[in-house]
Amino acid sequence: MKAELIANTYQLLLNGEWKETSSGKTIENLSPSDNMPVGAVQAMTENEVDLAVAGAKTAQKDWANRSFSERAELLYAWADQLLKMKEEIAETIMKEVGKGYSSAEKEVVRTADFIKYTAEEGKRIHGELINGGNFNAGSANKLAMVQRKPFGVVLAISPFNYPVNLSASKIAPALIAGNAVVFKPATQGAISGTLMIKALDKAGLPAGLVNLVTGKGSEIGDHLTTHPSINMINFTGGTETGEAISRKASMIPVILELGGKDPAIVLNDANFEKAAEDIVAGAFSYSGQRCTAIKRVLVMDEVADALVDKLKEKVNALKVGAPEDNAVVTPLINGKAADVVQQLVDDAVVKGATALTEIKRAGNLVYPVLLDNVTVDMEVAWKEPFGPVLPVIRVKNIEEAVTIANESEYGLQASIFTKSVEQAIHISNELETGTVQINGKTERGPDHFPFLGVKGSGLGVQGIRNSIESATREKVIVLNMNQG
Ligand code: NAP
Protein backbone atom coordinates (compact mmCIF):
# COMPACT_ATOMS: atom_id res chain seq x y z
CA MET A 1 0.00 0.00 0.00
CA LYS A 2 2.84 2.38 0.83
CA ALA A 3 4.47 2.08 -2.60
CA GLU A 4 1.15 2.69 -4.33
CA LEU A 5 0.51 5.81 -2.24
CA ILE A 6 3.89 7.26 -2.98
CA ALA A 7 3.52 6.72 -6.70
CA ASN A 8 0.08 8.29 -6.95
CA THR A 9 -1.02 11.44 -8.64
CA TYR A 10 -4.54 12.10 -7.38
CA GLN A 11 -7.31 13.32 -9.63
CA LEU A 12 -9.90 15.96 -8.95
CA LEU A 13 -13.62 15.18 -8.79
CA LEU A 14 -15.63 17.43 -11.05
CA ASN A 15 -19.31 16.79 -11.64
CA GLY A 16 -19.05 13.05 -11.17
CA GLU A 17 -15.82 12.57 -13.11
CA TRP A 18 -12.38 11.85 -11.67
CA LYS A 19 -9.87 13.52 -13.94
CA GLU A 20 -6.74 15.58 -14.42
CA THR A 21 -6.75 19.36 -14.58
CA SER A 22 -6.61 20.97 -18.00
CA SER A 23 -3.75 23.13 -16.67
CA GLY A 24 -1.54 20.07 -16.73
CA LYS A 25 -0.11 21.27 -13.41
CA THR A 26 0.10 19.24 -10.24
CA ILE A 27 1.34 20.03 -6.74
CA GLU A 28 3.57 17.46 -5.10
CA ASN A 29 3.15 16.93 -1.37
CA LEU A 30 6.20 15.79 0.57
CA SER A 31 5.92 14.25 3.99
CA PRO A 32 6.86 16.77 6.70
CA SER A 33 8.51 14.00 8.63
CA ASP A 34 10.96 12.48 6.11
CA ASN A 35 10.57 14.71 3.05
CA MET A 36 9.53 11.71 0.92
CA PRO A 37 6.86 12.26 -1.75
CA VAL A 38 3.36 11.34 -0.58
CA GLY A 39 1.68 12.07 -3.89
CA ALA A 40 0.50 14.93 -6.05
CA VAL A 41 -2.82 16.74 -6.44
CA GLN A 42 -4.22 18.74 -9.33
CA ALA A 43 -3.69 22.51 -9.51
CA MET A 44 -7.09 23.47 -10.89
CA THR A 45 -7.73 26.48 -13.10
CA GLU A 46 -10.23 29.26 -12.40
CA ASN A 47 -12.29 27.94 -15.29
CA GLU A 48 -12.50 24.53 -13.58
CA VAL A 49 -13.46 26.26 -10.34
CA ASP A 50 -16.33 27.89 -12.26
CA LEU A 51 -17.41 24.48 -13.58
CA ALA A 52 -17.27 23.05 -10.06
CA VAL A 53 -19.48 25.79 -8.64
CA ALA A 54 -21.93 25.64 -11.56
CA GLY A 55 -22.17 21.84 -11.34
CA ALA A 56 -22.82 22.02 -7.60
CA LYS A 57 -25.52 24.60 -8.16
CA THR A 58 -27.30 22.31 -10.61
CA ALA A 59 -26.94 19.18 -8.45
CA GLN A 60 -28.29 20.99 -5.39
CA LYS A 61 -31.75 21.46 -6.92
CA ASP A 62 -32.52 17.75 -6.95
CA TRP A 63 -30.78 17.09 -3.64
CA ALA A 64 -32.81 19.77 -1.84
CA ASN A 65 -35.99 18.02 -2.95
CA ARG A 66 -34.97 14.78 -1.27
CA SER A 67 -36.15 14.10 2.27
CA PHE A 68 -33.83 14.32 5.27
CA SER A 69 -34.05 10.55 5.67
CA GLU A 70 -32.99 9.96 2.05
CA ARG A 71 -30.07 12.31 2.49
CA ALA A 72 -29.16 10.51 5.71
CA GLU A 73 -28.76 7.25 3.74
CA LEU A 74 -25.88 8.77 1.77
CA LEU A 75 -24.18 9.83 4.99
CA TYR A 76 -24.50 6.40 6.58
CA ALA A 77 -23.01 4.83 3.46
CA TRP A 78 -20.21 7.42 3.51
CA ALA A 79 -19.34 6.59 7.11
CA ASP A 80 -19.23 2.87 6.22
CA GLN A 81 -16.92 3.48 3.27
CA LEU A 82 -14.63 5.64 5.39
CA LEU A 83 -14.27 2.85 7.92
CA LYS A 84 -13.53 0.38 5.12
CA MET A 85 -10.73 2.69 3.96
CA LYS A 86 -9.57 3.41 7.53
CA GLU A 87 -6.03 2.06 7.25
CA GLU A 88 -5.35 3.65 3.87
CA ILE A 89 -6.66 7.05 4.97
CA ALA A 90 -4.90 6.91 8.36
CA GLU A 91 -1.61 6.06 6.68
CA THR A 92 -2.06 8.96 4.29
CA ILE A 93 -2.86 11.42 7.10
CA MET A 94 0.21 10.16 8.94
CA LYS A 95 2.47 10.72 5.95
CA GLU A 96 0.91 13.87 4.61
CA VAL A 97 0.60 15.93 7.79
CA GLY A 98 3.01 14.06 10.08
CA LYS A 99 0.47 12.86 12.65
CA GLY A 100 1.11 9.78 14.78
CA TYR A 101 -0.54 6.72 13.20
CA SER A 102 -2.93 5.94 16.06
CA SER A 103 -4.09 9.59 16.22
CA ALA A 104 -4.61 9.49 12.46
CA GLU A 105 -6.67 6.33 12.79
CA LYS A 106 -8.71 7.91 15.60
CA GLU A 107 -9.37 10.88 13.32
CA VAL A 108 -10.93 8.59 10.71
CA VAL A 109 -13.10 6.75 13.26
CA ARG A 110 -14.18 10.00 14.89
CA THR A 111 -15.12 11.35 11.47
CA ALA A 112 -17.28 8.31 10.70
CA ASP A 113 -18.99 8.78 14.08
CA PHE A 114 -19.47 12.45 13.31
CA ILE A 115 -21.09 11.69 9.96
CA LYS A 116 -23.43 9.08 11.45
CA TYR A 117 -24.49 11.41 14.26
CA THR A 118 -25.08 14.17 11.70
CA ALA A 119 -27.39 11.86 9.76
CA GLU A 120 -29.32 11.10 12.99
CA GLU A 121 -29.48 14.72 14.04
CA GLY A 122 -30.59 15.77 10.57
CA LYS A 123 -33.63 13.56 10.90
CA ARG A 124 -34.59 15.49 14.00
CA ILE A 125 -34.46 18.89 12.32
CA HIS A 126 -37.96 20.20 11.80
CA GLY A 127 -39.73 23.49 11.56
CA GLU A 128 -42.38 25.00 13.78
CA LEU A 129 -45.85 26.45 13.66
CA ILE A 130 -46.41 29.86 15.27
CA ASN A 131 -49.85 31.24 16.06
CA GLY A 132 -50.24 34.93 15.22
CA GLY A 133 -52.57 35.37 18.21
CA ASN A 134 -49.65 34.98 20.60
CA PHE A 135 -48.58 38.49 19.60
CA ASN A 136 -51.96 40.24 19.54
CA ALA A 137 -55.61 39.38 19.08
CA GLY A 138 -55.70 41.11 15.70
CA SER A 139 -53.25 38.53 14.29
CA ALA A 140 -55.12 35.52 15.57
CA ASN A 141 -56.09 34.44 12.05
CA LYS A 142 -52.45 34.09 11.02
CA LEU A 143 -50.42 30.92 11.21
CA ALA A 144 -46.70 30.91 10.37
CA MET A 145 -45.15 27.70 9.05
CA VAL A 146 -41.42 28.00 9.65
CA GLN A 147 -39.21 25.58 7.74
CA ARG A 148 -35.44 25.12 7.48
CA LYS A 149 -34.14 25.51 3.92
CA PRO A 150 -30.63 25.00 2.55
CA PHE A 151 -28.60 27.97 1.36
CA GLY A 152 -27.60 26.38 -1.96
CA VAL A 153 -23.87 25.91 -2.59
CA VAL A 154 -21.62 25.85 0.49
CA LEU A 155 -17.91 26.45 0.10
CA ALA A 156 -15.98 24.32 2.63
CA ILE A 157 -12.33 25.28 3.19
CA SER A 158 -10.33 23.19 5.63
CA PRO A 159 -6.90 23.41 7.33
CA PHE A 160 -4.02 20.95 7.26
CA ASN A 161 -4.12 19.72 10.84
CA TYR A 162 -7.28 17.56 10.75
CA PRO A 163 -7.55 17.08 6.99
CA VAL A 164 -10.37 14.55 7.23
CA ASN A 165 -12.26 15.51 10.38
CA LEU A 166 -12.38 19.26 9.79
CA SER A 167 -13.45 18.67 6.20
CA ALA A 168 -16.23 16.18 6.87
CA SER A 169 -17.49 18.33 9.74
CA LYS A 170 -18.31 20.98 7.16
CA ILE A 171 -19.48 18.72 4.35
CA ALA A 172 -21.80 16.37 6.26
CA PRO A 173 -23.96 19.07 7.96
CA ALA A 174 -24.18 21.00 4.69
CA LEU A 175 -25.32 17.88 2.82
CA ILE A 176 -27.90 16.70 5.34
CA ALA A 177 -29.39 20.20 5.27
CA GLY A 178 -29.86 19.94 1.48
CA ASN A 179 -26.90 21.97 0.24
CA ALA A 180 -24.32 21.08 -2.39
CA VAL A 181 -20.66 21.57 -1.49
CA VAL A 182 -17.54 22.83 -3.19
CA PHE A 183 -14.71 21.47 -1.08
CA LYS A 184 -11.27 23.06 -1.05
CA PRO A 185 -8.89 21.13 1.22
CA ALA A 186 -5.63 22.58 2.54
CA THR A 187 -2.99 21.80 -0.07
CA GLN A 188 -0.90 19.92 2.52
CA GLY A 189 -3.76 17.61 3.47
CA ALA A 190 -5.42 17.48 0.06
CA ILE A 191 -4.52 13.83 -0.53
CA SER A 192 -6.19 12.79 2.73
CA GLY A 193 -9.15 14.97 1.74
CA THR A 194 -9.27 13.34 -1.70
CA LEU A 195 -9.41 9.84 -0.19
CA MET A 196 -12.24 10.98 2.07
CA ILE A 197 -14.12 12.17 -1.03
CA LYS A 198 -13.37 8.87 -2.76
CA ALA A 199 -15.18 7.17 0.14
CA LEU A 200 -18.14 9.52 -0.38
CA ASP A 201 -18.14 8.79 -4.10
CA LYS A 202 -18.14 5.04 -3.43
CA ALA A 203 -21.12 5.62 -1.15
CA GLY A 204 -23.18 6.83 -4.13
CA LEU A 205 -22.56 10.58 -4.30
CA PRO A 206 -24.75 12.17 -6.99
CA ALA A 207 -22.68 13.86 -9.72
CA GLY A 208 -21.74 17.44 -8.82
CA LEU A 209 -23.22 17.36 -5.30
CA VAL A 210 -19.72 17.60 -3.85
CA ASN A 211 -16.99 18.87 -6.13
CA LEU A 212 -13.38 18.62 -5.04
CA VAL A 213 -11.33 21.69 -5.82
CA THR A 214 -7.59 21.34 -5.30
CA GLY A 215 -5.01 24.03 -5.81
CA LYS A 216 -3.22 26.65 -3.77
CA GLY A 217 -5.39 29.01 -1.73
CA SER A 218 -3.12 31.87 -2.76
CA GLU A 219 -3.97 31.14 -6.42
CA ILE A 220 -7.63 30.10 -6.53
CA GLY A 221 -8.82 31.16 -3.04
CA ASP A 222 -10.09 34.63 -3.91
CA HIS A 223 -11.81 33.37 -7.04
CA LEU A 224 -13.66 30.80 -4.92
CA THR A 225 -14.60 32.99 -1.98
CA THR A 226 -15.90 35.83 -4.16
CA HIS A 227 -17.72 33.57 -6.60
CA PRO A 228 -21.28 34.86 -7.12
CA SER A 229 -22.81 31.36 -6.98
CA ILE A 230 -21.34 30.50 -3.58
CA ASN A 231 -24.12 30.99 -1.02
CA MET A 232 -22.25 30.32 2.22
CA ILE A 233 -18.66 29.80 3.37
CA ASN A 234 -17.53 27.50 6.15
CA PHE A 235 -13.82 28.03 6.83
CA THR A 236 -11.31 26.70 9.33
CA GLY A 237 -7.76 28.00 9.35
CA GLY A 238 -5.58 30.87 10.45
CA THR A 239 -7.07 34.13 11.73
CA GLU A 240 -5.38 36.20 9.05
CA THR A 241 -6.79 34.06 6.21
CA GLY A 242 -10.22 33.90 7.84
CA GLU A 243 -10.45 37.64 8.37
CA ALA A 244 -9.46 38.28 4.76
CA ILE A 245 -12.15 35.85 3.57
CA SER A 246 -14.84 37.45 5.72
CA ARG A 247 -13.97 40.88 4.32
CA LYS A 248 -14.17 39.65 0.73
CA ALA A 249 -17.30 37.52 0.98
CA SER A 250 -20.14 39.96 0.78
CA MET A 251 -23.79 39.39 1.66
CA ILE A 252 -23.40 35.67 2.38
CA PRO A 253 -23.15 33.91 5.74
CA VAL A 254 -19.61 32.99 6.80
CA ILE A 255 -18.58 30.61 9.55
CA LEU A 256 -15.02 30.94 10.73
CA GLU A 257 -13.06 28.68 13.06
CA LEU A 258 -9.73 30.39 13.54
CA GLY A 259 -6.67 30.48 15.76
CA GLY A 260 -6.43 30.46 19.53
CA LYS A 261 -4.21 31.18 22.51
CA ASP A 262 -6.01 29.03 25.05
CA PRO A 263 -4.87 29.61 28.66
CA ALA A 264 -4.86 27.06 31.46
CA ILE A 265 -5.48 28.92 34.72
CA VAL A 266 -4.23 27.00 37.75
CA LEU A 267 -5.47 28.05 41.18
CA ASN A 268 -3.91 27.38 44.59
CA ASP A 269 -6.24 24.51 45.44
CA ALA A 270 -5.86 22.62 42.13
CA ASN A 271 -4.93 18.97 41.94
CA PHE A 272 -1.48 19.63 40.42
CA GLU A 273 -0.91 16.09 39.22
CA LYS A 274 -4.15 16.10 37.22
CA ALA A 275 -3.64 19.69 36.05
CA ALA A 276 -0.10 18.97 34.83
CA GLU A 277 -1.21 15.81 33.05
CA ASP A 278 -4.02 17.62 31.23
CA ILE A 279 -1.95 20.68 30.44
CA VAL A 280 0.90 18.69 28.91
CA ALA A 281 -1.49 16.52 26.88
CA GLY A 282 -3.42 19.63 25.83
CA ALA A 283 -0.32 21.57 24.88
CA PHE A 284 1.80 18.96 23.12
CA SER A 285 -0.40 16.37 21.43
CA TYR A 286 0.17 16.47 17.67
CA SER A 287 3.08 18.77 18.50
CA GLY A 288 0.73 21.57 19.56
CA GLN A 289 -0.70 21.90 16.04
CA ARG A 290 -4.26 22.14 17.31
CA CYS A 291 -6.43 25.22 17.44
CA THR A 292 -7.54 24.24 20.95
CA ALA A 293 -4.06 23.35 22.22
CA ILE A 294 -3.22 24.89 25.60
CA LYS A 295 -0.91 27.70 24.54
CA ARG A 296 -0.08 29.35 27.89
CA VAL A 297 -0.31 28.55 31.60
CA LEU A 298 -1.36 31.22 34.09
CA VAL A 299 -0.48 29.92 37.55
CA MET A 300 -0.73 31.52 40.98
CA ASP A 301 2.70 32.49 42.30
CA GLU A 302 2.43 30.51 45.56
CA VAL A 303 1.93 27.20 43.77
CA ALA A 304 3.89 27.81 40.58
CA ASP A 305 6.96 25.82 41.68
CA ALA A 306 4.86 22.78 42.54
CA LEU A 307 3.06 22.87 39.19
CA VAL A 308 6.16 23.60 37.12
CA ASP A 309 8.01 20.62 38.65
CA LYS A 310 5.24 18.32 37.51
CA LEU A 311 5.00 19.95 34.09
CA LYS A 312 8.73 19.51 33.58
CA GLU A 313 8.64 15.85 34.53
CA LYS A 314 5.81 15.19 32.08
CA VAL A 315 7.26 17.22 29.21
CA ASN A 316 10.53 15.34 29.56
CA ALA A 317 8.62 12.07 29.28
CA LEU A 318 6.96 12.99 25.96
CA LYS A 319 7.81 10.72 23.06
CA VAL A 320 9.53 12.72 20.33
CA GLY A 321 10.15 11.35 16.86
CA ALA A 322 8.43 9.86 13.85
CA PRO A 323 4.67 9.63 13.28
CA GLU A 324 5.17 5.96 12.34
CA ASP A 325 6.36 5.33 15.92
CA ASN A 326 3.30 7.07 17.38
CA ALA A 327 5.45 9.85 18.79
CA VAL A 328 3.48 12.69 20.42
CA VAL A 329 5.85 15.38 19.20
CA THR A 330 6.60 14.89 15.51
CA PRO A 331 8.09 17.16 12.82
CA LEU A 332 5.98 20.27 12.22
CA ILE A 333 4.08 20.74 8.98
CA ASN A 334 6.93 22.67 7.33
CA GLY A 335 10.18 24.51 7.99
CA LYS A 336 8.42 27.87 8.18
CA ALA A 337 6.23 26.62 11.04
CA ALA A 338 9.35 25.43 12.89
CA ASP A 339 11.01 28.82 12.30
CA VAL A 340 8.02 30.58 13.90
CA VAL A 341 8.32 28.45 17.03
CA GLN A 342 12.07 28.89 17.22
CA GLN A 343 11.76 32.65 16.86
CA LEU A 344 9.18 32.83 19.68
CA VAL A 345 11.39 30.73 21.96
CA ASP A 346 14.52 32.78 21.13
CA ASP A 347 12.69 36.05 21.82
CA ALA A 348 11.46 34.76 25.20
CA VAL A 349 14.88 33.48 26.27
CA VAL A 350 16.58 36.74 25.28
CA LYS A 351 14.00 38.63 27.35
CA GLY A 352 14.63 36.49 30.44
CA ALA A 353 12.38 33.42 30.26
CA THR A 354 13.80 30.22 31.76
CA ALA A 355 13.91 27.23 29.42
CA LEU A 356 13.27 24.12 31.51
CA THR A 357 13.90 21.73 28.65
CA GLU A 358 16.71 21.54 26.15
CA ILE A 359 16.09 23.80 23.15
CA LYS A 360 16.76 21.54 20.23
CA ARG A 361 15.68 21.35 16.60
CA ALA A 362 16.36 18.96 13.73
CA GLY A 363 14.80 20.26 10.51
CA ASN A 364 11.06 20.54 11.10
CA LEU A 365 11.31 18.61 14.34
CA VAL A 366 11.18 21.01 17.28
CA TYR A 367 11.72 19.28 20.61
CA PRO A 368 9.13 20.23 23.26
CA VAL A 369 9.94 23.46 25.06
CA LEU A 370 8.71 24.40 28.52
CA LEU A 371 9.34 28.06 29.31
CA ASP A 372 9.04 29.36 32.87
CA ASN A 373 8.97 32.99 34.06
CA VAL A 374 7.41 34.20 30.85
CA THR A 375 6.31 37.83 31.04
CA VAL A 376 3.83 39.86 29.03
CA ASP A 377 6.51 41.71 27.08
CA MET A 378 7.48 38.44 25.36
CA GLU A 379 5.90 37.54 22.03
CA VAL A 380 5.26 33.97 23.18
CA ALA A 381 2.79 35.32 25.75
CA TRP A 382 0.47 36.46 22.93
CA LYS A 383 1.26 34.78 19.61
CA GLU A 384 -0.10 31.41 18.55
CA PRO A 385 2.97 29.19 18.02
CA PHE A 386 1.17 26.16 16.48
CA GLY A 387 4.06 24.09 17.74
CA PRO A 388 5.41 22.35 20.86
CA VAL A 389 6.11 25.26 23.19
CA LEU A 390 4.38 25.96 26.50
CA PRO A 391 4.93 29.31 28.24
CA VAL A 392 4.26 29.55 31.97
CA ILE A 393 3.28 32.98 33.26
CA ARG A 394 3.30 33.35 37.04
CA VAL A 395 0.55 35.67 38.32
CA LYS A 396 -0.18 37.37 41.67
CA ASN A 397 -3.87 36.57 41.81
CA ILE A 398 -6.98 35.48 39.92
CA GLU A 399 -7.71 39.02 38.71
CA GLU A 400 -4.31 39.20 37.04
CA ALA A 401 -4.87 35.79 35.42
CA VAL A 402 -8.25 36.88 34.04
CA THR A 403 -6.82 40.18 32.78
CA ILE A 404 -3.96 38.47 30.92
CA ALA A 405 -6.30 35.78 29.59
CA ASN A 406 -8.67 38.41 28.22
CA GLU A 407 -6.01 40.71 26.79
CA SER A 408 -5.44 38.17 24.02
CA GLU A 409 -6.70 38.89 20.52
CA TYR A 410 -8.08 35.32 20.60
CA GLY A 411 -11.00 33.80 22.49
CA LEU A 412 -11.38 30.12 21.68
CA GLN A 413 -11.26 28.14 24.94
CA ALA A 414 -9.74 28.29 28.43
CA SER A 415 -9.17 25.75 31.21
CA ILE A 416 -9.47 26.37 34.92
CA PHE A 417 -8.01 23.93 37.43
CA THR A 418 -9.42 24.22 40.96
CA LYS A 419 -11.39 22.18 43.49
CA SER A 420 -13.88 25.01 43.92
CA VAL A 421 -16.65 24.73 41.36
CA GLU A 422 -18.15 28.06 42.50
CA GLN A 423 -14.84 29.82 41.94
CA ALA A 424 -14.44 28.13 38.56
CA ILE A 425 -17.90 29.20 37.41
CA HIS A 426 -17.27 32.74 38.60
CA ILE A 427 -14.01 32.92 36.62
CA SER A 428 -15.62 31.20 33.61
CA ASN A 429 -18.15 34.00 33.44
CA GLU A 430 -15.33 36.55 33.32
CA LEU A 431 -13.38 34.87 30.51
CA GLU A 432 -13.85 36.08 26.93
CA THR A 433 -13.83 32.68 25.24
CA GLY A 434 -16.34 30.47 23.45
CA THR A 435 -15.86 27.62 25.95
CA VAL A 436 -14.33 27.15 29.39
CA GLN A 437 -13.22 23.71 30.55
CA ILE A 438 -13.31 23.17 34.30
CA ASN A 439 -10.66 20.66 35.42
CA GLY A 440 -9.97 19.43 31.92
CA LYS A 441 -7.84 20.32 28.93
CA THR A 442 -9.11 22.55 26.17
CA GLU A 443 -10.42 20.50 23.28
CA ARG A 444 -12.99 20.34 20.54
CA GLY A 445 -15.69 17.82 21.20
CA PRO A 446 -17.49 15.69 21.93
CA ASP A 447 -18.61 16.81 18.51
CA HIS A 448 -22.24 17.45 19.42
CA PHE A 449 -21.27 20.15 21.95
CA PRO A 450 -21.48 23.70 20.58
CA PHE A 451 -18.03 24.84 19.46
CA LEU A 452 -17.17 28.46 18.82
CA GLY A 453 -14.56 31.14 19.17
CA VAL A 454 -15.01 34.81 20.01
CA LYS A 455 -12.84 37.81 19.05
CA GLY A 456 -10.09 36.70 16.61
CA SER A 457 -10.98 33.02 17.12
CA GLY A 458 -14.04 32.93 14.97
CA LEU A 459 -17.54 33.65 13.93
CA GLY A 460 -20.62 31.44 14.14
CA VAL A 461 -21.14 28.17 15.97
CA GLN A 462 -20.26 24.59 15.05
CA GLY A 463 -21.19 21.37 16.83
CA ILE A 464 -23.37 18.90 15.01
CA ARG A 465 -26.82 20.43 15.59
CA ASN A 466 -25.44 23.99 15.37
CA SER A 467 -23.59 23.14 12.17
CA ILE A 468 -26.75 21.81 10.52
CA GLU A 469 -28.73 24.86 11.62
CA SER A 470 -25.90 27.12 10.44
CA ALA A 471 -26.17 25.50 7.00
CA THR A 472 -29.85 26.44 6.72
CA ARG A 473 -31.98 29.54 6.73
CA GLU A 474 -35.55 29.88 7.85
CA LYS A 475 -38.37 30.04 5.36
CA VAL A 476 -41.68 31.39 6.62
CA ILE A 477 -45.02 30.72 4.96
CA VAL A 478 -47.93 32.59 6.54
CA LEU A 479 -51.42 31.22 6.22
CA ASN A 480 -54.06 33.94 6.60
CA MET A 481 -57.22 32.10 7.61
CA ASN A 482 -60.66 33.29 6.79
CA GLN A 483 -62.40 34.39 9.91
CA GLY A 484 -65.91 34.32 8.41
P1 NAP B 1 -4.35 28.56 6.69
O1 NAP B 1 -3.00 28.74 6.16
O2 NAP B 1 -5.17 29.77 7.04
O3 NAP B 1 -5.12 27.69 5.57
C1 NAP B 1 -6.44 27.24 5.77
C2 NAP B 1 -7.11 27.00 4.43
O4 NAP B 1 -7.29 28.25 3.75
C3 NAP B 1 -6.31 26.13 3.48
O5 NAP B 1 -7.19 25.31 2.77
C4 NAP B 1 -5.67 27.15 2.54
O6 NAP B 1 -5.32 26.63 1.29
C5 NAP B 1 -6.82 28.12 2.42
N1 NAP B 1 -6.48 29.44 1.91
C6 NAP B 1 -5.29 30.08 1.94
N2 NAP B 1 -5.41 31.30 1.34
C7 NAP B 1 -6.69 31.43 0.96
C8 NAP B 1 -7.43 32.44 0.29
N3 NAP B 1 -6.89 33.59 -0.09
N4 NAP B 1 -8.74 32.22 0.03
C9 NAP B 1 -9.32 31.07 0.39
N5 NAP B 1 -8.67 30.06 1.02
C10 NAP B 1 -7.37 30.24 1.30
O7 NAP B 1 -4.37 27.64 8.00
P2 NAP B 1 -3.60 26.26 8.26
O8 NAP B 1 -2.15 26.56 8.39
O9 NAP B 1 -4.03 25.21 7.30
O10 NAP B 1 -4.18 25.85 9.68
C11 NAP B 1 -3.64 26.35 10.87
C12 NAP B 1 -4.53 27.41 11.48
O11 NAP B 1 -5.87 26.94 11.55
C13 NAP B 1 -4.14 27.75 12.91
O12 NAP B 1 -4.17 29.14 13.10
C14 NAP B 1 -5.22 27.08 13.73
O13 NAP B 1 -5.42 27.65 15.00
C15 NAP B 1 -6.40 27.18 12.85
N6 NAP B 1 -7.38 26.15 13.18
C16 NAP B 1 -8.52 26.52 13.83
C17 NAP B 1 -9.45 25.57 14.20
C18 NAP B 1 -10.70 25.95 14.93
O14 NAP B 1 -11.58 25.12 15.02
N7 NAP B 1 -10.82 27.16 15.48
C19 NAP B 1 -9.21 24.23 13.92
C20 NAP B 1 -8.04 23.89 13.26
C21 NAP B 1 -7.14 24.86 12.89
P3 NAP B 1 -3.77 26.24 0.97
O15 NAP B 1 -3.44 25.11 1.89
O16 NAP B 1 -3.81 25.85 -0.46
O17 NAP B 1 -2.95 27.47 1.23
Image (cartoon, grey):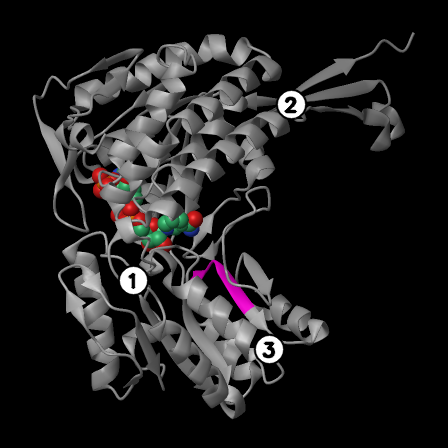
Q: Which mark is residue 387?
A: 1
Residue 118, given in percent of the width and then of the height, sits at 56, 30
Q: Hey, which quadrant is residue 94 in on the image?
A: top left
Residue under the image location 26 percent in, 46 percent down:
97
- Which residue does the numbered mark 3 point to in the structure image? 271
Viewer-side residue, 290 vs 90:
90
Confirm if mark 1 falls within 8 A of ligand 1.
Answer: no
Label 3 and label 1: CA atoms lie apart by 26 Å
- Which residue does the numbered mark 2 point to in the structure image? 123
Q: Quadrant of ligand 1?
A: top left
Residue 268, given in percent of the width and then of the height, sits at 59, 85
- Crowding around mark 2 (Cα neighbors within 10 Å: few <14, some 14 to 19, many 20+) is some
The magenta region covers: 409-415
Is residue 65 found left or right of 165 in the rendered image? right
Confirm if mark 3 falls within 8 A of ligand 1.
Answer: no
Describe the element under mark 2 as helix, strand or loop. helix
| Badge nearest the viewer, 2 or 1 | 1
Describe the element under mark 1 as helix, strand or loop. loop
- Confirm or deny contact between disc 2 and disc 1 (CB under 8 A): no
Residue under the image location 74 percent in, 21 percent down:
144
Residue under the image location 47 percent in, 69 percent down:
279
Name the residue furthest bottom: 302
